[in-house]
Amino acid sequence: MYVVGLVIPVPEEKMEAYRAWAQSGARILKRYGCLEIVESWEDNVPDGKTTDFRRAVDAGPGEKIVFSWQIWPDKASLEAAEAKMHADGALDVSGEIPFDNTRLIYGCFAPIHTMGRE
């Protein structure tokens, strides 16, 4: 298992546009081997004393935090899929992205412990 994580500031009024954008992206990622995607809309994101999700992405007034992750079989599968998606043009953006993609946080992680998955 290999995990891709994202933290994204999204204008509150663009929640439905984000949902549609995420669903479209999920269909593409699934075709290239992604096993699971979870898109989570802010429900309880407290301000921290030193740092927090909002400050991490410089979220402004009226922006909500999306916490998203993708599960891939392994790192090699993700890397092969990314190369193929770029070559195929599958990741070419058409239309408006419903958030400022310069402020999202993206990272890849190798699990060291899991619970609830075989």
Image (cartoon, helix red, strand yellow):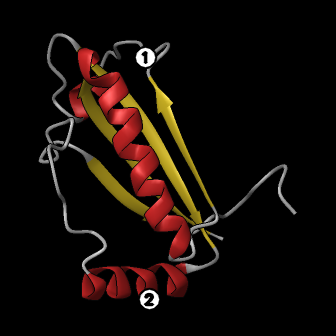
Residue beneath disc 2:
80
- The structure residue drawn at horizontal position 48% and vertical position 78%, both measured from the top left corner, is 78
Q: State the quadrant of the C terminus.
A: bottom right
Front residue of 27/68: it is 27
User: In the figure, 12 relative to 106: above or below?
Assistant: above
Q: CA distance from mark 2 to mark 1?
A: 34 Å
Write down the residue under mark 1. Answer: 45
What is the crowding at mark 2: few (fewer than 14 residues within 10 Å), some, or many (at least 20)? few
Tell me the element at label 1.
loop
Q: Which residue is pictured at 17% across the width and 46% down the height?
A: 101
- Where residue 15 is drawn, which disc sits there? none
Pointer 1: residues within 10 angstroms few (<14), some, or many (20+)?
A: few
Mark sitting earlier along the chain (2/1): 1
> Percent position (x, y) of residue 14?
26, 23
Residue at the image position 17 percent from the left and 57 percent from the top? 94
Tell me if I can see residue 59 in this picture. Answer: yes
